[in-house]
Amino acid sequence: MVARALACRDVAGAVLLDVGCGHGALRARVAPYVRRYIGVDVARYASLEAGVEFHQLDLDSGQVPPDLEGVADVVAAVETIEHLENPRAFVRTLARLARPGGWILVTTPNVRSALSLATLVVKGQHSQFQDASYPAHITALLDVDLRRIAAEVGLTDVAVDFSRSGRMAFTPWRYPSWLARRFPRACSDNVLLAGRRPL
């Protein structure tokens, strides 16, 4: 989703800040668009490549080191926002990390997918927010919530997209790609918010 979002935006040669970078899996996927990759997380994972530029940051704190403020053309938070207590404060922090005119990309589990809604009806919990995912996943957000947060933070050129890949409810099978493209909200496990920090 992030690579697809970058492909349709003018970000060639970008400085990308991967917030909540974990093992750094995003790095390879965005390599064609990025000249400088910076990983940010609460702790450095042992599996993160030794040469990766890394900054330790408690994402719930709202604190931004001065050397990271306004440094990135793209700030990506892939499957991170659902782990945090205050999504609005988090997106404000992401905006501070982006340069004016820079892009903020946020992905999270899609709680409006057919799988998540069916799980909610049957089990009383969204599929990615069941007891087994707690306390890691604590904040479930709808795509409309992401749009509202973007508006509250003042992001421009806001768009929402879906992964177009998802598991069918109560089966191990995934939706055929043609069906996921036709009904992206229902057939996608994840949702992406894209928005720009104002100039």
Image (spheres, helix red, strand yellow):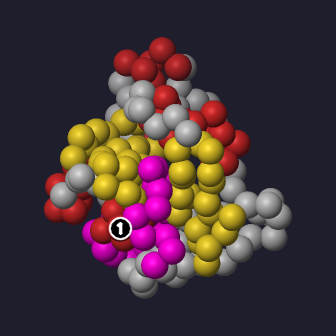
Eyeballing the image, is 112 above or below 46?
above
Q: Position of residue 30 (x, y in %)?
A: 61, 40
- Would you say 28 lies left or right of 84 here? right
Residue 49 visible in image: yes
Residue 92, located in which quarter of the rendered image? bottom left
Seen at 46% across and 78% down, the residue is 66
Residue 86 lies in magenta, yes or no? yes
Tell me, yes or no, whether the highlighted magenta stretch contains residue 9.
no
What residue does disc 1 label? 96
* Residue 189 in sight in this render: no
Along the line of sight, which residue is nearer the eye, 138 or 155? 155
Residue sitting nearer the eye, 128 or 18: 18
Q: Is residue 46 above or below residue 100?
A: below
- Image coordinates of residue 9 in percent, x first then y, are 40, 32
Q: Is residue 7 above or below residue 141?
A: above
User: For the image shown, how many numbered marks are present on the structure?
Assistant: 1
Give the left or right position of residue 168, taking residue 181 as reference.
right
Magenta stretch, residue numbers = 66-91
